[in-house]
Image: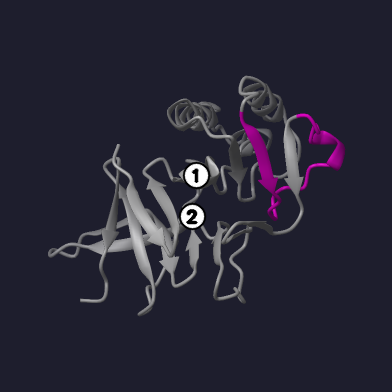
């Protein structure tokens, strides 16, 4: 898989086709919107959705941990979808297998589990935005970002629509980048896409065929 090295001032950000960002300077992986537990939530409502979707996502995280050996893994919100279900046990068991990595959660709008559910020896929970060097980590995109900072966030599930010569349309997940903000794609496979519109200061890096590819809308 081929990532894309994005430079923001002195900060090097590796955009990964696994829908994550690796930052070597901080030995950290950033992931947004995995929505674990969503399949079980749908099954409880009588809609048959396989748990294999989430198992596949956990295996992707495991491969990232094995490859990059991160000291920290930051979930930028919506770690778990809505109310508690049995899938939470699988998630904590997975985290237990990786004691060398510190698991952080910047809480999102779907992170509504009671505080006592988050075991203090596994999860470092941040109820609001988190400052990390030049970065501000948050769930929702911030409106007012200091010019010396860059906001890395999720929530939107960004995608970009590409059009072929015969009116074919393909919408792909992307990293959506503006002057000092990066909106990460939703990591979870059981999530939708929101089609973004690029302004003159925006850029999209789409995920296609296990690659991260910059798309130029300004020519």
In the rendered view, tell whether residue 129 sits above or below residue 27: below
In the rendered view, tell whether residue 57 sits above or below residue 127: above
Please provide percent x and percent y for residue 124: 74, 40
The picture quadrant where one finds residue 146 is bottom right
- Residue at 40 percent across and 48 percent down: it is 14
Is 119 contained in the magenta span? yes
In the drawing, does residue 11 fall left or right of residue 149?
A: left
- Residue at 38 percent across and 59 percent down: it is 7
In the rendered view, tell whether residue 57 sits above or below residue 171: above
Please provide percent x and percent y for residue 72: 60, 38
- Badge 1 is on which residue? 187
Furthest-bottom residue in this view: 200
In the drawing, does residue 62 fall left or right of residue 120?
A: left
In the drawing, does residue 56 fall left or right of residue 74?
A: left
Q: Quadrant of the C terminus?
A: bottom left
- Mark number for residue 184? 2
């Amino acid at each position: 898989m081929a990532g894309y090295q994005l430079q923001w001032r002195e900060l090097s950000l590796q955009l990964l086709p696994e829908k994550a960002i690796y930052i070597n300077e901080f030995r950290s992986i950033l992931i947004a919107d995995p929505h674990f537990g969503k399949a079980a939530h749908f099954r409880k409502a009588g809609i048959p959705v396989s748990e294999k979707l989430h198992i596949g996502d956990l295996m992707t995280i495991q491969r990232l941990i094995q490859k990059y050996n991160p000291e920290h893994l930051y979930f930028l919100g919506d770690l778990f979808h809505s109310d508690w279900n049995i899938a939470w046990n699988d998630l904590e068991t997975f985290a237990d297998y990786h004691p060398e990595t510190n698991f952080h959660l910047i809480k999102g709008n779907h992170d509504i589990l009671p505080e006592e559910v988050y075991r203090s020896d596994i999860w470092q929970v941040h109820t609001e935005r988190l400052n990390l060097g030049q970065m501000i980590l948050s769930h929702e995109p911030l409106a007012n970002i200091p010019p010396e900072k860059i906001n890395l966030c999720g929530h939107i599930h960004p995608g970009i629509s590409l059009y072929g010569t015969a009116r074919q349309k393909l919408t792909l997940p992307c990293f959506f980048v503006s002057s000092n903000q990066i909106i990460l794609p939703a990591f979870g496979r059981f999530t939708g896409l929101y089609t973004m519109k690029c302004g003159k200061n925006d850029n999209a890096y789409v995920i296609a065929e296990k690659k991260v590819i910059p798309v130029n809308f300004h020519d």
